[in-house]
Image (cartoon, rainbow, N blue to C red):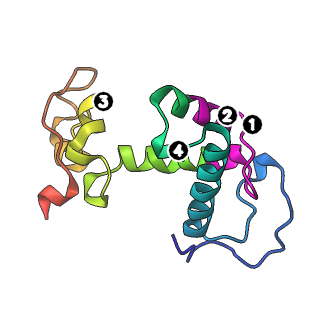
Amino acid sequence: GGAAKMYRSGPFHKGKPEQGYQLALTPCQFFQAGIAEANAWSHKTYGKEFDGLSQPDRVAALKAMEEGKAELATLGSRMFFNALLSITMEGFFSDPAYGGNRNYASWKMLGFPGLPATYADKFEEYRNKRYVAPPRSMADFS
């Protein structure tokens, strides 16, 4: 989250949506600010911070952010929503060794057996056929 590999020397002009991230914040600062601003907007709109909302209100709040209708103080709600969605998917579908996808939840849901190199000898045998095996992380081999 420290943006060690990001260009961070500005100028930071307001860009077009297709230009992507155009802020001077590190990813960590961006998410901290986004969470704080989303909670402030949620409290103003629903009387509670986001994590205290009912399921229907959470869905409505997320839809408002996705559509850019939630008025966050300094960040665009659509930009924050898209970044949050992207990083959530990255964590959910990643190798559990990185801290997400607990108990291989998404891999089991998809039927993905995990580290592909360990199944190289099965590619031809199972081409165009379903291969069922318990998922294995790279951590399972170290």
Q: Nearer the viewer, mark 2 or mark 3?
A: 2
From which residue to which does the magenta span run?
60-80
Q: Amino acid at mark 2?
A: Ala
Estimate the x, y position of residue 73 in percent, counting from the top left: 75, 56
Check disc 3 and report the residue beneath it: 110
Secondary element under disc 2, as helix, strand or loop, is: helix
The reply to whether callout 1 and callout 3 are in contact (CB within 8 Å) is no
Sequence-wise, which precedes: disc 4 or disc 3? Answer: 4
Q: Amino acid at mark 4?
A: Phe
Label 1: how many residues lie within 10 Å, few (<14), some (14-19) or many (20+)? some
Give the side of residue 67 with respect to residue 97, left or right.
right
Secondary element under disc 1, as helix, strand or loop, is: loop
In front of the other: 73 or 21: 73
Image disc number at residue 50: 4
Sequence-wise, which precedes: disc 1 or disc 3? Answer: 1
Check disc 2 and report the residue beneath it: 64
The residue positioned 83% from the left and 50% from the top of the image is 16
Distance of label 4 from label 3 (alpha carbons) = 29 Å
Secondary element under disc 4, as helix, strand or loop, is: helix
- Magenta region includes residue 69: yes
Distance of label 2 from label 4 (alpha carbons) = 13 Å
The residue positioned 26% from the left and 52% from the top of the image is 96
Give the side of residue 102 with respect to residue 66, left or right.
left
Q: Amino acid at mark 3?
A: Leu
The reply to whether callout 4 and callout 3 are in contact (CB within 8 Å) is no
Check disc 1 and report the residue beneath it: 69
